[in-house]
Image (spheres, rainbow, N blue to C red):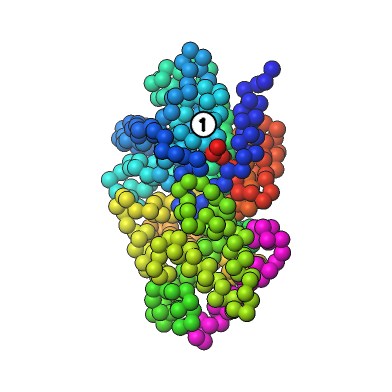
Amino acid sequence: MTTPFLLVLQICLAVAAKNFHLGRSKGGNLGTPMGYHSEPLPIARWFNQKLDHSNPLNLMTWEQRYFVNDKYYDKKNPGPVFIMIGGEGPADPKWMVKGAWIEYAKRFKALCFNLEHRYYGESHPTDDMSTKNLQYLSSSQALDDLAFFIQEMNELYKLPKDTKWIAFGGSYPGSLAAWARVKYPHLIFASVSSSGPLLAKVNFMEYFKVVVEALREKTGDDDCVTQVKLAHQQITSLMREQPDIIENEFKVCKKFSDASPDDVKNFYNSIADDFADVVQYNEDNRIGANEEYRNVTINSICKLLTNDKEKPAYKRLAEFNAIIMAKNNQTCLDYSYDNMIKELRNVTWGGDEARQWMYQTCTEFGFYQTSSAEVEVFGDAFTLDFFIQQCEDVFGKKFNKEFVRNAAAWTNSKYGGLDVSVSRVVFVHGSVDPWHALGITVTKDNDAPAIYIHGKLYILIKTS
């Protein structure tokens, strides 16, 4: 007889075999599922959520957005409940009608929920995002949101007491899916943790190491990496001697003669982020991806960088940058540090949600993708101090290096980092995804198996 967890594991293995790609850039979200063809979507629902779960004397509440698909749930013969955990982006109702998890919901007669993460999308717990108000934004509060939501839905839907809740999460929600089993094992029966970075690390230098390895792995040689490194060396040399050449090639918004040292660091970081974006979303064919740029993959970019070697490497890199700028509808490359900080200081709702995620990195995780690795393919301009300075400039001087290091240490102590002790969690990672460096990729306990797939990003909810 198949045990409930073996049944969940069968689902997870089947999902993993489908190769669903999902990375995460500065903000990161699921995007839109492949195969969505204007099916009727569930309407947004609102849940009266507690503001501060850590303080029972605080009775303030707010309205949290969620979505439901109860189409396949059979009250006479009830199945499990699937819950997609929201992360650092808006919840998208299209995921309620498409995806492998919906196919399995049909098979197992599951009730499906998608709970949006506090402070993201339209789930606004406070009037604005002032630093004072962001004190209620944390993974711990998000897990408590999840627990309270589950208890209330059990009552609202009059679910049987033996109902099994299965949590799905990818990226930061992948971490939440695992931690939910640690913190609330009596509420969540099992979890699928995809590409979840369980280790909070301030100086995440391994990130670009994996990006470099992905370029090698996908192309089969070192030529692409060599050309990227050569291009950066040429850029550094020309910036000293003939900066106007780089200004013209990269279509920058202001001259380097007017740039501050922080601007220059931001320039190099922007170029490196282009590669991070391509690696994370390599061969992502979901609906919602810009049709014109779906062929922007590791292979296509490396082909651009390694062909036509009569042209200087920096020119070929500039052509790649132009593709990314066009994809993002940019007419010029704005590398201004002050402009970036100004945007991040905006406390009103309706922006790109970068402020919220930065707050979480400064107060919980770090995750700073620095150029501090031994292989300085992308130069060495954006070190840890560059990112810590952003924490201080956006949120205040107390958010310094010591503060951020203590915050990351607290997170690892609270959840266990890579030594987390948990059962009935499936950890799924792909070798191309840089975030696997902070996740569990080797099975330590048969009750918490790891699935590590070479040559892929992570997999969560592959669409049909």
Decide if residue 110 is in sight here.
Answer: yes
**Tag 1: Cα neighbours inside 10 Å, few (<14), some, or many (≥20)?**
many
Q: At x 43% / y 74%, what residue is drawn?
A: 251
- Which of the 4 quarters of the picture holds residue 336? bottom left
Q: Position of residue 363 (x, y in %)?
A: 46, 51
Q: Position of residue 71 (x, y in %)?
A: 44, 24
Seen from this angle, which residue lies furthest top? 76
SS for tag 1? helix
Q: Which residue is mark 1?
A: 102
Residue 435, placed above or below residue 145: below
Q: For the image shown, how many numbered marks are present on the structure?
A: 1
User: Would residue 150 be found to the left or right of residue 170 on screen?
Assistant: left
- Which of the 4 quarters of the picture holds residue 213? bottom right
Q: Which of the pair 89/462 is nearer the observer? A: 462
Q: At x 44% / y 54%, what residue is drawn?
A: 358
Q: What's the residue type where badge 1 is placed? A: Ile
Seen from this angle, which residue lies furthest left? 127
Residue 317 belongs to magenta span: no
Q: At x 45% / y 48%, what residue is drawn?
A: 288
Q: Position of residue 344 (x, y in %)?
A: 37, 59
Q: Which of the pair 315/395 is nearer the observer? A: 315
Decide if residue 136 is in sight here.
Answer: no
Q: Quadrant of the N terminus?
A: top right
Residue 377, placed above or below residue 83: below
Q: Which residues are magenta?
A: 214-243
Q: At x 54% / y 59%, what residue is drawn?
A: 296
Q: Position of residue 260 (x, y in %)?
A: 42, 76
